[in-house]
Amino acid sequence: MTDALVPAEAVPHVSVLRDAVLEVLLPAPGKLIIDATFGAGGYSRALLDAGCRVVAFDRDPTARAYAAPLMASGRFVLIEDRFSAMAAHVDGPCDGIAFDLGISSMQVDEADRGFSFMRDGPLDMRMSRSGPSAADLVNGAEQAELARIFFVYGEERQSRRIASFLVRRRAEQPFERTLDLAEVVERALGGRRGAKTHPATKVFQALRIAVNGELAEIEAGLEAAEQLLREGGRLAVVTFHSLEDRIAKAFFTERAGRTPGGSRHLPPAERGPEPTFEMIFNGAQKPADAEIAANPRARSAKLRAAIRTGAPAWRAAA
């Protein structure tokens, strides 16, 4: 993709749970909202339409093309960096922060990014287009490390078998293309056998997460949001798979003081820091059937949300 301007009507992306996120953030003129995962700017556009000031983050350089048309508002800034670094770029405090985690539709749809096994392309998967690629990882990591990555980040039960196949194959010819990797994974698992999802789905997810350090980034990003939000500020987090949601759920549960207590037969546990968030609703909201029908990629999405209390950020208080 070039840096040519992309008009709103040409944006190839539908922001999942956008209306629900806006209901959480309560956008209004003059409010400062951070769009932590800009992508094609779905949340940012809606927030600007509501009169907010928006600071957006995206480490993918292709986001510039979608951000450029928004600059004319005079209320929008795009920062090309990881969202975990938001506290270094925003003085704060801010009124709301939104996270739309995972990979963007544009990244999946562009074959040359190498995120998908549905299209042949270079085995890349780098969100920032810098640093080691998925090909570097597949061709260079030890067999045990590959197995660990597939098991931990992909929750793939056949991780050791797949890693063994990949190591044997790369000794003959290094992996360079997405379809080549997908075909070898499929052979390792004995074909599809009527499965609803492609056998390589979990392997590709695991590699993407490992290449981009996504899970550690989520943890650091949520801690940064805790530091930046003012009292009464609102946090909305949309997740798309169990690993992301597990981190978000644990963060909200802990910071809202809802961590399960100890046994009644033991002395009371030592009291920890004061809760820094109050849940807006229990559990997670999911897309309505109509949204899933219009945008199938929304089917696995979950929204968790909370309001910042006046207690000091846990990291700052430590």
Image (cartoon, helix red, strand yellow):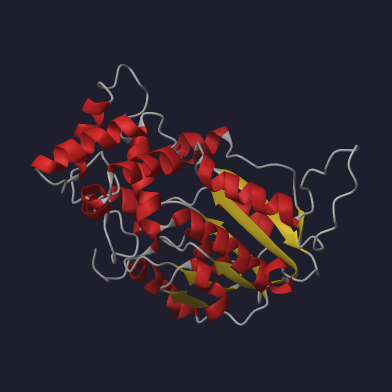
Indicate left or right for 72 with 32 as reference.
left
Which sits in the foreground, 273 or 106?
273
Q: Is residue 36 above or below residue 170?
A: below
Q: Total of numbered circles in the picture? A: 0
Quarter where residue 10 is shown:
bottom left
Percent of width and height locating residue 296: 44, 37
Which sits in the foreground, 292 or 233?
233
Indicate left or right for 69 with 289 as reference.
left
Quarter where residue 21 is shown:
bottom right
Q: Residue at x 27, y 50 (%)?
A: 141
Percent of width and height locating residue 170: 15, 42
Query: Which quadrant of the rendered structure holds the N terminus?
Result: bottom left
Q: Residue at x 23, y 68 (%)?
A: 2
Q: Is residue 92 above or below residue 297?
A: below
Q: Residue at x 33, y 33 (%)?
A: 160
Which sits in the foreground, 166 or 14?
166
Q: Is residue 262 above or below residue 217?
A: above
Percent of width and height locating residue 127: 34, 60
Q: Residue at x 80, y 63 (%)?
A: 273
> Would you say residue 12 is visible in this rendering?
no
